[in-house]
Amino acid sequence: MSGGREFTSRFILGSGKYSLKLIEAAVRDAGAQIITLAVRRANTKERENILDYIPDGVTLLPNTSGARNADEAVRIARLARELGCGDFVKIEIMRDSKYLLPDNAETIRATEILAKEGFVVMPYMYPDLNAARDMVHAGAASIMPLASPIGSNKGLATREFIQILIDEIDLPVIVDAGIGRPSQACEAMEMGAAAIMSNTALATAGDLTLMAGAFRQAIEAGRKAYLSGLGRVLARGASSSDPLTGFLRD
């Protein structure tokens, strides 16, 4: 649940690489109920309007991609609401053009402003516990830590820091950016993540439909494993899984 809405899917389609086939596969095969949208894509006459391809019933999550500070992010979020994209907003603020790492301090500031205006704010962040706590206090509805740099498909490079957020932050933790394989999505869900956002992994796959389905199954499997209570990990040695092995020695 986020912003008073309930979702049965734990896969979110990120923005960046879009096509009609990608959106269809994400919704039909990966089960996406939320699709992010860069506002600049919905407000251009030079390209096709991506809104025309997003099915009814799918929740739009406009993002503030392109914002370099809190003021720019707030302006983009307000524009998205005026365009009819609703109250959900993903805050993305990046001053770093090489690595595209989020600016946590400016993100906190934008989160506070927009939350007071009634937005359901989902901030994209570098996984830092103190920053995450500040985002909670600022009114965030969830937090979205990066797994690795955007579009890299490198997986859970920040795994240990994301686990700290999952353990310490009482909000949904949506793992965003860098998840490149279904196995990585499964691992994040086993850790206790609430959902996975991905785009490049699907968009660059050889068979988009198969990859979308694989992500859906991996996310569902990871969630079930988390809820089941994963078995212990031995520090060293081995432990027999068969209670009858002692009988064989008699």
Image (cartoon, rainbow, N blue to C red):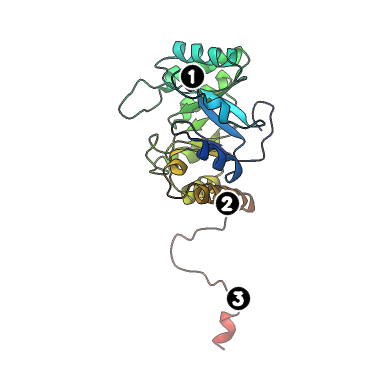
Mark identifier at residue 217: 2
At which x and y percent is residue 81? Answer: 59, 15
Q: Is mark 2 on a helix, strand or loop?
A: helix
Within 10 angstroms of label 3, few (less than 14), some, or many (20 or more) residues?
A: few
At which x and y percent is residue 181? Answer: 45, 48
Residue 249 location, quadrant: bottom right
* Range of magenta residues: 41-45
Query: In the image, is 98 to the left or to the right of 220?
Result: left
Counting residues from the start of the chain, the first of labels 3 and 2 encountered is 2
Counting residues from the start of the chain, the first of labels 3 and 1 encountered is 1
User: Is the residue 234 above or below the residue 27 in the image?
Assistant: below
Q: Is residue 111 visible?
A: yes
Assess whether residue 42 is covered by the magenta stretch.
Answer: yes
Tag 2: amino acid: Gln
Within 10 angstroms of label 1, few (less than 14), some, or many (20 or more) residues?
A: many
Q: What element carries label 3?
A: loop
Disc 3 marks which residue?
A: 243
Q: Residue at x 46, y 10 (%)?
A: 71
Disc 1 marks which residue?
A: 108
User: Is the residue 231 above or below the residue 130 in the image?
Assistant: below
